[in-house]
Image (cartoon, grey):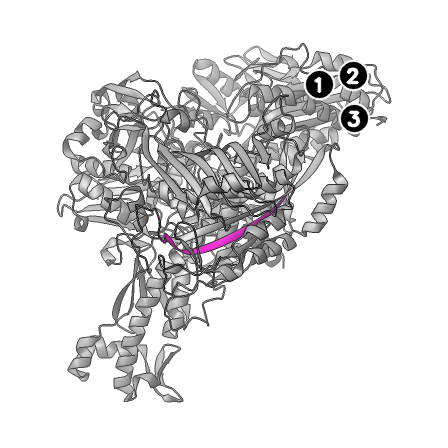
Amino acid sequence: MSGRPSAETTVEPAERVDRLGKWSGTSVPRKEDRRLLQGQGAFADDTWQRRMGYAHFVRSPVAHARIVSIDTSKAESLDGVFATLTGQEVREITEPFFQIAPEPGGNIEEYCLATDKVRYQGDAVALVLAESRDIARDAAELVDVEYEPLPAVVDTVAAADPDAPVLHEEVGTNVVWHGVYDYGDVDWALENADHVVRIDRLHFHRFSSTPLECSAAMVNWDPGTDVVEIYSNNQMPMFASLVIGPSLGVPSNRLQFRSQDIGGAFGIKIGSYPQLAGLALLSRKAGRPVKWTEYRTDHMLSAGHGNERVFLDVEIPVMSDGTILGFKVRAFDDAGAYLHYEPLGAVIWSQVTPGCYRFKHIRVDYTETVTNKCPTVPNRGYSRLQHLWLTERIVDLVAHELGFDAVELRKQNYVQPEDYPYETPNGCVYDSGNLPKALDMALEAIDYPAWRQRQQELGKGSGKRIGIGIGTTLDSGTNNFGQARIVNPGLPFSGNGEAAYVKLDLYGEVSVNLGTTPQGQSHETTAAQVVADILGVSPDDVHVTAGFDQRHNTYVAFSGTYASQFAVTGLGAAMGAAEDLRGEIVKVASFALEAAEEDIELEEGQAFVRGESERAIPFMGIANLVYSNVAAMPPELADSVSLNCRHTYRPPFEVPDPETKRGNLTLTYASQTHACVVEVDEESGEVKILDYAVADDCGRLINPTIVDGQVHGATAHGIGAALYEALEYDEDGQLMQSSFYEYHAVTSLDVPAIKTVHVETPSPFTPNGAKGMGEGGGAPLHAVCSAIQDALDDDSPIVAHTHNPWERVYWLLNPEPGMRRGVVVESR
Amino acid sequence: MLLESVEYTRPATVEEALAALASNEGAAPLAGGQSLINVLKNRVASVALLVDITRLAELRNVDARSDGSLEIGACVTYDELDRSAEVRRGHAILADVAGRIEDQQIRNRGTIGGNCCLSDPTNNLPPLLIALGATMNIQGGAGVREVPADQFFHGYFSTAVEQGELLRSITLPALEPDAGAGYNSLTIAGDSKAIVRASAYLRGNGTIEEARVVLAVVGPRPIRHAGMEARLRGQPATAETVARASEAVGEDDDLSPPTDAHASADYRRRMAPVVARRAVSDAMAKGGDGDE
Amino acid sequence: MSDGGTAHPIKVTINGETHERTVLARTLLVHFIRDVLALKGTHIGCDTGNCGACTVIYDGRTIKSCMMLAAQADGAEIQTVEGLAENGELGPIQRAFHEHHGLQCGYCTPGLLMSATALLRDNPRPSEAEIRRGIRGNVCRCTGYVNVVKSIEAAAEEVSR
């Protein structure tokens, strides 16, 4: 089938004059490093303000309970305590948070502190403000809360049962969203396929990227200006603003978000807006700035977890030549106790509906429930990695069960290089790629034939076995927020955008402000690279403001750093602003040098006439004319330039169709292909990674070393989740991993040396040919599961979990007699 | 993360430390703090008075005696054990195990005494010290008393050291020329939390004359596995002997491993014989003239 | 509980400068460094001494400053990340991290630099395995350690020249 977009979904290739070249594409060393290497970064907990108090949240120790009473009197009478705040007070003076879900899920009434009930261990019930950290902590212990425990529900499938304990009475059910995504004709495919492979259950577990820096903020509801100043490490401040503004009754122009350095975020720090709202109220009540430090235990309990997803009754129609026609599945997503950013996850996975493959017939019956667990947030790979893991298990298990070679089967079913731009069954457009080549390169990087040989020689029964696995994945980037209408047609959201501001300052210095909130993605450096290319200066001459400051007025509603889009949206905005500025410089230079605009070049901080380098004017001269020598220019020119250029990059999107659930939901599709070799200990199930390679394709590389760094980091997160990291609740809703003692964030001894190779298929849709990347797509989960499966016996149970600590692998090696394998094949 | 209110004193001598410990029922010695400060930060237990003993020179000795035994002060750090020529010479396995405890920062502060006295069942050193036949020297108001290591560890955070006493030092007997000591841990990750640990001591040339097999994380305290030891004693020092002997672990014994965030009781019980076998094999490889 | 306890006078030398202060027994060394002395380069990442973001060099050896009371540090000589630059110029280890992209968000970096400093003082030519063991106590969530190891290898070459 041709890969050209149908009449329904069209994406215009980006028009651009390509000035990128001298600096873009080079691994320019980072501007951010100087301050960070000297410990001079400004992180959110580094702030201090006169008269400030320290805040501590009182959190529920139980998963589900009615709040019978809260008594703050003992806490308040402790010497050094300034104020307290409870849910009762909050309910009286604020509105509940805006909900994305349609009814009945949208009926959830959530405030920044729990009011009648607590719904997860860690749910905040009160705030205390005191003159020191220690006193705030001591006072929190003195807040007397009486709970009447209720039965807890901790499993998403069980929560969907009408008899399950209901978390939100105003919703009446725990099912906060349900929809069926149906493309092609999967029933026909199942009936006519040569084989049907059926998988009982696949489980994608709960884990978190756990940024090393926890949340923190200094919030001051300034009594003089009535402006709420929020210096925090929230990574999507405008989303936070949209939610907490109406709740607090504060208009957007009196909410002021700022941040400079953020110690990692990975999507988790999108979820800190409820805490910020509570801190704002506490600040107003106490008449003081409020400093909040989130400790690791608070973070594990309440900052936000990644989505857990259960896939039931997977059915896969396969032809005898290995063509996989599609699949059918019932998916249950666990959103935790409240909907923070959810249920957008219920549509976001569909950016990659067929995964890397040309599947045509797909039905996903998707249910999202609340449970008595920490609310989920868009953890690195958000909602797509869960679905991509499903598609990879599908291909891997089809190969395994039907006796196809896993490499060849993938290549056969991949979207092919000649198919791009490729329209998926639900109208998304994969912009570019070369998956077969990436797979070959990843396998070459580990010397695949040599490992196959070693595996054969080692065999089984010697105490150790070798397994080789492949994981291919997509990192869809630059969201179309119109996807929100697919979960709730009433939502007035669509498209995307990012803003940037590039100017010449008084002496002609180049300055850039961004609307993004980088947490290690090197925005200052890459923005400087593209601006330098466009203006003909060096990145060292481009000053990029560190961090985000709303007062710079360089933001749109989607501003922030999340969802693998900076290279497109952030750099697109910076490039647009730089082009605008370039135009103005050329215009002024044309006047000053008495030459035609098309004859003007910019190089080394000067504008000059092509071919006559003595006819030149430095940027300092341009700035002088516009800022301090204005009458020397003709009035029409003076009126038309300011050297202050603000640009909003708008990716080309249309509004998707909620009826058919079709539309182009993301602009770019980076891909990663991982090859993993494991050694499995036959007695204990212990897994050791012996070799690991990644082939990354994020389109045109602006800074190859920085891209590699993101690949390494995403790989480490994925390996962590695959073998070491899990967030598990017992049946009473108690989190078993509430500190780094129990939750093993991977160390230098756990993450292997990672080989990276690059495929570069530029995106035709972006201003610079780059694709957003950074989330990674969770490929280590796919690859490690695949490798472990490869090490097992042919009739072993299937690897059905994303998380495979030694104990689980032990059981795969030693299944109980009569234990179901988890997969069944029907052939005609 | 933040401690409750607590008092602190740093005595200049062991006598002063003992007096401080006796003066207050809520007093506890503070050595490296790599366990105790965590306990206090996470409010797992309360201490009224911390008696800082880290700088007491009398507790920081490593003395190789003429009879080949080794006396190690309670406040010797894991890193010091790793670097000590005397420890390497006398009991290299102690240096090796201490040198792989968690990470360098923890090894720079954590002490052998602290590792024993906090008696967390997952700790690295207790099973090893029992296997090596160590003697724990406890000092109190009445002087120093000796407790064999296999009677020292009572349960979670509970040892033979009583209120008002201090573990002063640990004595390791000389390792005989025909003896070897072994160690094996199954952990959740590199140099990390224990699923099961085992340590072993074998003596004999060709035939096993003496055997000690110690398992940890199989209950509130490390235990010697009498059943496995009995199947080793008097047997030829071969891999078959060790494999057969390890079958005794899990049969007819009182293992009561915990279920925690890192592993279930069931998995620990199943892994105990595997780790025990590996520790004994390790001992055999390092000792006498074992016939493999 | 409302009584914070006795205050202890301590004298601590940090990056060559001596400070005399009074602290409560329960104050952790890392909070003393960050809140009392306003040296914000040393960071906090966990509650249980597992992440190493708070690593400083104490009397010549790396320690996690969240696992020590400020009161214990009386008389000690401490080096933090702020003490690594030489006359405002980045030191060789810092330069190596810059050249080899050994940092992304920078939050773990101060602790890592202190561990790397101590490692190379002790072992000027470490193997990759020794480097990985040496930084086992510093969690990084951004780099996957790949370029951190490269940076320390490069620094070792530079320092041992």
Magenta-drawn stretch contains A673: yes
Mark 3 or mark 1, which is nearer the start of the sequence?
Answer: 1
User: Which mark identifies residue B213?
Assistant: 1
Q: Is residue B143 above or below residue A562?
A: above
**Dot 1 alpha-carbon crowd within 10 angstroms: few under 14, some 14 to 19, many 20 or more:** many
Q: Are marks 1 and 3 on the same chain?
A: yes
Magenta span covers which residues?
A: A662-677
Amino acid of disc 3: Met
For label 2, the residue is: B232
Could you say where residue C22 lies in the image, as x and y percent from the top left?
35, 34
**Other residues around mark 3 within 10 Å, as few (<14) / some (14–19) / many (≥20):** many
Q: Position of residue A77 (x, y in %)?
A: 21, 23
* Residue at 62% in and 57% down: C157
Q: Secondary structure at mark 2?
A: helix
Residue B243 seen by the camera: yes
N-terminal of the pair, mark 3 or mark 2, is 2
Q: Main secondary structure of the magenta part?
A: strand
* Distance between mark 1 and mark 3 Cα atoms: 12 Å
CA distance for labels 3 and 2 = 11 Å
At label 2, the amino acid type is: Leu
Is circle 2 on the same chain as circle 1?
yes
